[in-house]
Structures are given as structure tokens and as C-alpha cells.
Image (cartoon, helix red, strand yellow):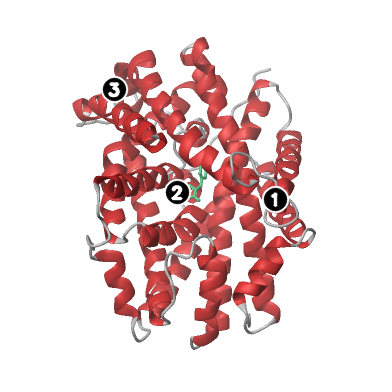
């Protein structure tokens, strides 16, 4: 037993890895179109409120559980109370399911990088996209490559693999997205997109139900974007040094995450409006709408490559965190070697991902509850597993483990002063669970 537990080599490394987990397809592939669908600016306001009121406290709670136990998510919950291991199990399952569709999209991104390397533009983007993602073999090959790269990084371990890659990819991503956002903002007609993103428009909102729907989407997006409610931060927190400042990190991570989501909105929406296209075009936004934009803009091919490489960086740093959650359980619990755990888990995920990929084509007719496999998996994680995981995490920390234990952990035994004791206690015990529960129940009415 007792292998020495791996650790991050520096706080900056941890921050890049945790922010790398948070910044992902959720920021670039989802945020602009969910915002587009949900009234733009109003969505943004709800998003920021939920982020501060619910997101940051849960982030702190999860990191403390990880750091206090130094265990993977399932065993960490079990150590707090043996009856509560199931909270970790929910996270473990959610990570597996998310990873199985995340890799499919990751594979599409690789395909687009490759396409722009060999051709200077995609002529008929909608047909190109539909033909590609509904075919049976090619997307599976790309998704395989994506999983293989993820596995390779995770096999190299915490400081040598995950941390090293995140320290390079995240700053580069930041640089690329700034270049693209500036380029979009300089396009004639860009201001319409900026207005859509930042100025609330109440004309579309006719009932309290509409507002509720936007609120629900914002909550789902906060959870997804911060990688909450599923053990990622327990796992990453478990490799933290006892002296690391948890609250400071818990603020830096969402700040970076939101900044990149907003930059992604600024990179995408002004360009979409400048060419009179539809912002709420669904997941097809970056794969179908943006290629039209790239085809028309100066240096379009260069920007396209930069853009898809940046999406790849975002996706891979999140994918490694998902794989790590699943693999860490086997590494700690069953005492399996890191290589075997990473490879074995990747193989399982690959098999599930094949079905997700085929649900865009050959298995498109296969529906459960009226949804194809992809829709079923995204609904299961976004609307069910992650909110339930987040709710239970609040209960576990607020009542089972207890706020005093958490406060002791976040102060690193008195090393750091934490001023928001009452606020975090009220949030974790009452506000966050009540809000999550209300929204969850309302969404099923
Ligand atoms: N936060 C990631 C994103 O925005 C997705 C993710 C969710 C990663 C949960 C890890 C855990 O894309």
C-alpha cells in the first residue's frame, strides 16, 4: 500500500490545471450559444450572480474535501462518512458520461484543425459538418486520437503530465482568444454582437416561466463551466499542498473561467452579427456558422486554425481532469498503476463514445425518452447528475462534515484568515441547496 501521493509542484501549476479544467468546450462551444438562446445579456447577469452566490462556495467546499482527505472523490466522501460514498460515485459516473461526449466534440475540433491545414476554406459548412458528423468511421478515428492524447497526458502524472501541459496550454489559449476577439471587434457591424451580448433585452421575455428557464440554463452553465458537483475539484484538491490558499484559488479559477467565456462571446458573437448570421444556432455555432465567417474575413484561414487550436487546448485540459477523476479511483483505491488506470479508463470511455458519435448518424433513430444518445447524455449530466451532485455536496459539507471542519481546512489550520465564515455557512447550508432544489424541481414541472 501507501504509495506516496503525488502533488502539484506549485500553486501556479495547480491554478492552471484547475482553471484548465474549468475552461473548456463549455466556455467556447456552449457559452456563446446558450447566451445567444437565452437573451444574451440577461443570461450573463444571472450567470454572474449564480457564480458568486453558489459557484464559489461549492468550489471551496469541494477543494477542502479533497485537500482534507487526500483521496479520490469516492474515497474522500467515504472518509467523511462511509454512508456518503455515493456522492463520490455520482461524480465518478458524471465524469465518465461527460467524457464520453466531450471526446466526440474534441474529435470534431481535431478534424477542423486538419481541414484548415489542408484547405483554405470550407465551402459549404453546413453540408460539410452534417456529412462529417453523421458518417460512421471518420469521427470515431478523430475521437480515438483525442482520447489517446488525453490518456498520454494523464499517464505522465500530476506534476509531469497534467500540470506541465496546463501551464503551457492555458496561457496560449488566453493569447489566441484575445487576438481573435480583437479581430472580431474590428469587423464592420461588430457592435450589434456586442450589444446583443451586453445590453439586456426584455422584449423576448413574456412570462415568469421565461425568466425561470434562463435562470435554469445559467445554473446549469455555472456547474458545467466550473466543473462542479462531480469530484473534479475534490480530485485536483487532493493533490494540493497543506499550505495552499484554497479561498484565493477559488476566486481565481472562476475569474479566469468567466473572463475566457466572455472573451469567447466577444470572439464569436460580433463576427456572427457582422455577417448577418444566427447566434443561437445550437452546437453547430462554432462548426457551421464560424466557417462562414472565416471564409469571408481577411486572414480567415489563419484565424480559423488559431481558433480551432485554441478550442483544442481548452477541450484537452478539461478532458484530462475528467479522466483523472475516473482514473484516480483505481489508482488510490485498487492500487492499480497510473498507466494501467489511465489506459483502462480511456478504453471504457472510448467504447461509450463510439455510441455517442454514432448517434449523429447511424444510430440517430435510436431514441430513449425521445432523445438520441448524445442528447440523453448531455441532459443526464447537465440537468440531473451535476445539480444533484452539487446539492449533495452542500449537504455533505454543510451538515455531515460540518462547517467548522471545512473552515479549519480552508484556513490551513489558522495560516490564512477567512472573513466570510457566516456567508459561506449560510450558502452551503441553506441558500445553495434551496436554490438548486427549487430550480431542479421547477425544471421538471
Ligand atoms: N468545465 C468544463 C467546460 O467548461 C467541462 C467539465 C465539466 C470538465 C466537468 C470537468 C468536469 O468545458
**Looking at the rendered structure, which numbered label has been put on residue 103?**
none
Q: How many marks?
A: 3
Residue at 71% of width from left, 55% of height from top? 143
- Pointer 3 or 2: first along the chain: 2
* 130 lies left or right of 80: right
Residue wearing tag 1: 365
State whether residue 33 is above or below residue 254. below
Q: Residue at x 68, y 62 (%)?
A: 133
* Percent coordinates x, y for residue 312 in the rendering: 58, 61
Q: Is residue 275 above or below residue 420?
A: below
Badge 3 is on which residue? Answer: 429
Q: Quadrant of the N terminus?
A: top right
Q: Quadrant of residue 216?
A: top left
Q: Residue furthest right?
A: 137
Residue 406: % across, % down = 34, 22
Q: Secondary structure at mark 2?
A: helix
Q: Secondary structure at mark 1?
A: loop
Mark-to-mark CA distance, 1 and 2: 37 Å
| Horizontal side, residue 19 vs residue 365: left or right | left
Amino acid at each position: 500500500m501507501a504509495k506516496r501521493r503525488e502533488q502539484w509542484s506549485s500553486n501556479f501549476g495547480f491554478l492552471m490545471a484547475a482553471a484548465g479544467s474549468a475552461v473548456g468546450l463549455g466556455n467556447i462551444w456552449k457559452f456563446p450559444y446558450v447566451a445567444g438562446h437565452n437573451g444574451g445579456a440577461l443570461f450573463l447577469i444571472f450567470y454572474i450572480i449564480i457564480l458568486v452566490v453558489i459557484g464559489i462556495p461549492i468550489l471551496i467546499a469541494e477543494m477542502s474535501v479533497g485537500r482534507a482527505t487526500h483521496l479520490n472523490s469516492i474515497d474522500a466522501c467515504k472518509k467523511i462518512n462511509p454512508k456518503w460514498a455515493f456522492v463520490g460515485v455520482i461524480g465518478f459516473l458524471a465524469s465518465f458520461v461527460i467524457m464520453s461526449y466531450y471526446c466526440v466534440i474534441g474529435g470534431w475540433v481535431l478534424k477542423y484543425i486538419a481541414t484548415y491545414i489542408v484547405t483554405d476554406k470550407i465551402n459549404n459548412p453546413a453540408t460539410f459538418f452534417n456529412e462529417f458528423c453523421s458518417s460512421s468511421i471518420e469521427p470515431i478515428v478523430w475521437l480515438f486520437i483525442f482520447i489517446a492524447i488525453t490518456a498520454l497526458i494523464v499517464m505522465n502524472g500530476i506534476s509531469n503530465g497534467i500540470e506541465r501541459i496546463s501551464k503551457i496550454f492555458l496561457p496560449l489559449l488566453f493569447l489566441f482568444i484575445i487576438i481573435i476577439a480583437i479581430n472580431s471587434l474590428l469587423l464592420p457591424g461588430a457592435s450589434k454582437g456586442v450589444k446583443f451580448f451586453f445590453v439586456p433585452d426584455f422584449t423576448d421575455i413574456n412570462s415568469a416561466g421565461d425568466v425561470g428557464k434562463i435562470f435554469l440554463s445559467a445554473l446549469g452553465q455555472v456547474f458545467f463551466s466550473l466543473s462542479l458537483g462531480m469530484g473534479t475539484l475534490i480530485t485536483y484538491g487532493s493533490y494540493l499542498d497543506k499550505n495552499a490558499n484554497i479561498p484565493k484559488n477559488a476566486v481565481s479559477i472562476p475569474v479566469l473561467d468567466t473572463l475566457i467565456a466572455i472573451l469567447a462571446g466577444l470572439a464569436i458573437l460580433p463576427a456572427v452579427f457582422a455577417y448577418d448570421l444566427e447566434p443561437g444556432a445550437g452546437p453547430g455555432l462554432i462548426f457551421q456558422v464560424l466557417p462562414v465567417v472565416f471564409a469571408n474575413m481577411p486572414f480567415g484561414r489563419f484565424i480559423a486554425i488559431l481558433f480551432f487550436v485554441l478550442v483544442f487546448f481548452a477541450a484537452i485540459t478539461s478532458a484530462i481532469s475528467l479522466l483523472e477523476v475516473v482514473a484516480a479511483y483505481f489508482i488510490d483505491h485498487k492500487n492499480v498503476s497510473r498507466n494501467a488506470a489511465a489506459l483502462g479508463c480511456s478504453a471504457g470511455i472510448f467504447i461509450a463514445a463510439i455510441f455517442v458519435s454514432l448517434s449523429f448518424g447511424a444510430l440517430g433513430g435510436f431514441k430513449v425518452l425521445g432523445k438520441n444518445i448524445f442528447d440523453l447524455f448531455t441532459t443526464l449530466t447537465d440537468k440531473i447528475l451535476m445539480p444533484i451532485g452539487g446539492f449533495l455536496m452542500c449537504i455533505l459539507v454543510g451538515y455531515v462534515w460540518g462547517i467548522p471542519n471545512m473552515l479549519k481546512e480552508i484556513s490551513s489550520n489558522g495560516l490564512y484568515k477567512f472573513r466570510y465564515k457566516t456567508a459561506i455557512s449560510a450558502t452551503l447550508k441553506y441558500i445553495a441547496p434551496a436554490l438548486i432544489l427549487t430550480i431542479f424541481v421547477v425544471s421538471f414541472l
